Amino acid sequence: MDELDIRSFWRRGDKAFTDDFFSVDVRKLAREYCLRPNSEAFILAGSVTVDLEWRQCHLGGYRVYFCCPRCLGRCCILYRFPKGEMPSDQYGCKKCLNLAHPVENEGESERAFRRFKRAYERRGSEDSSQPEGKPLWMRWPTWRRLTDQFLATIEGRLEYDEKMTERLRRLYKS
């Protein structure tokens, strides 16, 4: 028990991540190739033909979806799985391939760091020529609100670090 695997503290699932696979988004294809509601199929790499489903929107217009080659369900993004007997078996939706977004497997530490980073970026870079480092374009109430959010994320991170330190102390004491 000399070596401690830190990943075990926040690793929740053992699914593969969507970022690890090549993906095809039908919304991008519709913009790039100017797909219209009369198109019924689209040919992907490797001569794989995927059916398209067009749904009418409530306020007019149409929305396009892929029909997943595996489950025939409606999806916006198809992922290319490297293993498959036939080329059509290589493509599937997130559900069929049992994939997860990286955010789904994040633990407390990663979530806290992501919140901290987002709050830091929203707050803007600190301008030393302005009072309190507030950017010129930002209004004072917004600056104060974002600063409070930023400080709250720092406090949350410190609380988490204290909790993990205590957990490690108890683990190594026994």
Image (cartoon, helix red, strand yellow):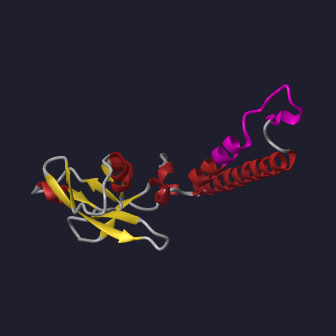
Image quarter (top left, top right, bottom left or bottom right) of the C terminus: bottom right
Q: Nearer the viewer, residue 128 or 53?
A: 53
| Residue lying at the far left of the rendered structure | 85
Q: Residue at image x 47%, y 58%?
A: 105
Where's residue 143, x and y in %? 81, 45
Where's residue 146, x and y in %? 77, 49
Q: Is residue 119 magenta?
A: yes
In the picture, measured across the screen, residue 107 lies left or right of residue 139, that is left
Q: Can residue 163 be seen at all in this image of the molecule?
A: yes
Q: Is residue 67 magenta?
A: no
115 relative to 12, above or below: above
In the picture, measured across the screen, residue 171 lies left or right of residue 3, that is right
Q: Residue at image x 67%, y 50%?
A: 161
Where's residue 125, x and y in %? 73, 34
Q: Residue at image x 31%, y 51%?
A: 24
Q: Nearer the viewer, residue 112 or 37?
A: 37
In the picture, measured across the screen, residue 34 lies left or right of residue 122, that is left
Q: Which residues are magenta?
A: 116-136
Which quadrant of the structure image shows residue 128? Answer: top right
Q: Nearer the viewer, residue 109 or 80?
A: 80
Q: Can residue 95 be seen at all in this image of the molecule?
A: no
Q: Residue at image x 43%, y 56%?
A: 101
Q: Nearer the viewer, residue 107 or 24?
A: 24
In the picture, measured across the screen, residue 84 lies left or right of residue 161, that is left
Where's residue 158, x and y in %? 72, 49
| Residue lying at the far top of the rendered structure | 129
